[in-house]
Amino acid sequence: MTVKGDMVYAWTTSCDIHGECGGAVTALLQYALSSGMVDAVLAVCRGADLYDAKLELITDPAQMPKSAGSLHCGTLLSAKMVKKYLGGAREMKIAVPVKGCDAMAFYELAKRQQINLDNVILIGLNCGGTVSPMVAREMIADKYAVHPDAVFKEEIDKGQFIIEYTDEGGAHQHKGISIEVLEEGPEGYGRRQNCQRCKCKVPRQADLACGNWGVIGEKAGKATFVEVCSEKGAALLDAAVSAGAVAVCAPEPKGLEIRGKVESAMLKLGDKNRAHQFGELGEGRERLERIMRLSSRCIACRACIENCPICYCVECSTAKPHLVRPGQVPPDFMFHLIRFAHIADSCINCGQCQELCPMDIPNALFMHAQQVELEKMFGHRPGYDMTMPVLAFAEEMDERARLSATGSDMIFDNVFNE
Ligand code: FAD
């Protein structure tokens, strides 16, 4: 019987599934659906091209194979989608493949009662980082001297961003360049800035954590390393193996060791990138002035708010005329202060507020820098468990009712006085 903490190599037994590393993830999701463990799978599928990923709600198990494969340019707010369009999984059971930041968003929304995690199976994917689609296209043309449309597969392996493409003569070729070299250059190539700072590489807060690190020997490239992270994950893996949907074997001891070493090297790199990127922001007054200067490009389009997985307030304070004057461009700095006050303790560094900012304001860098400072002060580490941040102890509507009933202007006073 499988239990939490077990580790196995796993692969699909179906020849219809052409997975990234043996297809175990697709087979597990397909089994969860066909066995009735879940009503639907919110899968990540290829969109318009290789650089485009889209979420698709799959209810027919026969449709699962189309979601197989890793899309390294895709980063999608699956948790926000579940909250916004699937009723927070209150009425349906859903399985979702999640990278670290996706898993963190599920936890932050769950602790705010916006998602019912009991109804969600999170299949975690180890993630060394993703590359923005625009950056990927530019980088491939510039550094690889290959037309981005000629690429039919991209992957990040052994520290390299590797492309497979068809050359002018119709032959298949492949080329890899070290991620470190790409990221050191002045062009801003390589992984997204937030991914460079990420330290959630193996998402153990999911039910299973799956990845290719540590798969060596004859199974290399043909199986996925699965770490069982919860009883729910153990039950799914057990049932899928018993039903013959997934096959497993013990991992190579050397593979275990390699996986540990790679993870710890990635975490060290995350620390190095944090030190560098936060260092460039300066400290204290200098940091504030820099944030104010760069934020003055803001056109108040609200993309940072719409796309933040933590923003869930029913009435957004940034839309209140007594706090932020309507119609001002750039908006009063209070607009950004409100966002910082509401989010900074819980920022999961998904990077969406920066990625989707039409004015290229490094919003995620600002927010993440503050989160790291707040974590040092209050010890709250967002996205890993159901521990509440200080301010989330108050329900927003209750808090507003209290303020209006008492005439108090001391927001969250009840929390701090408890
Ligand atoms: P498959 O059966 O091919 O299923 C893959 C699943 O991933 C599908 O359900 C699909 O919907 C989902 N998916 C595809 N793209 C995304 C995306 N962008 N976001 C969320 N879900 C997605 N493993 C490591 O050990 N080290 C790494 O550094 C690493 N980096 C990764 C980076 C990304 C962006 C992704 C998506 C995966 C990464 N993996 C990494 C995991 C690895 O590539 C395989 O996905 C894993 O081993 C499972 O293989 P499989 O054949 O069982 O999956």
Image (cartoon, rainbow, N blue to C red):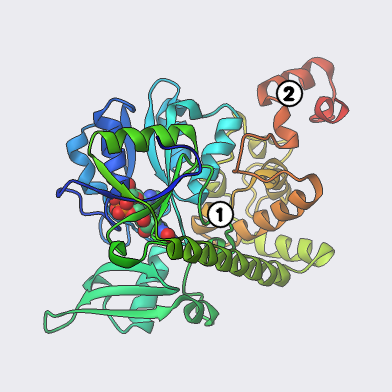
* Residue pointed to by mark 2: 399
Going from the N terminus, do you reach mark 2 or mark 1 first? 1
Query: Amino acid under label 1?
Result: Cys
Residue at (41%, 37%) from the top-left corner?
2
Is residue 322 left or right of 105 when viewed as pictured? right
Image x and y of residue 249, in percent: 33, 50
Relative image position of residue 269 (x, y in whole percent): 59, 69
Residue 2 as seen in the image, left or right of residue 273? left
Dot 2: what SS? helix
Per the model, the C-alpha gap separating discs 2 and 1 is 33 Å
Is 7 or 51 nearer to us in this picture?
Answer: 7
Eyeballing the image, is 215 above or below 377? below
**Other residues around mark 1 within 10 Å, as few (<14) / some (14–19) / many (≥20):** many
Quadrant for the N terminus, please.
top left
Determine the secondary structure under disc 1. loop
Please report the residue visible at 74 percent of the width from the left and 49 percent of the height from the top. 375
Which image quadrant: the C terminus?
A: top right
As drawn, 133 above or below 350: below
Q: Which mark is residue 352?
A: none
Ligand 1 within 8 angstroms of badge 1 C-beta: no
Task: Work out whether residue 222 or residue 176 is closer to the camera in this orientation and state it.
Answer: 222
Provide residue 117's location: percent of width, then percent of height. 50, 30
Q: Position of residue 107 (x, y in %)?
A: 56, 37
Q: Quadrant of residue 85?
A: top left
Q: Quadrant of ligand 1?
A: bottom left
- The answer to whether 64 is drawn above or below residue 366 in the figure is above
Residue at image coords 38%, 23%: 92
Residue marked by disc 1: 200
Mark 2 nearby-residue class (10 Å; few <14, some 14–19, many ≥20): some
Q: Is residue 57 among the parts visible in the rendering? A: no
Hey, which quadrant is residue 196 in on the image? bottom right
Dot 2 beta carbon under 8 Å from ligand 1: no
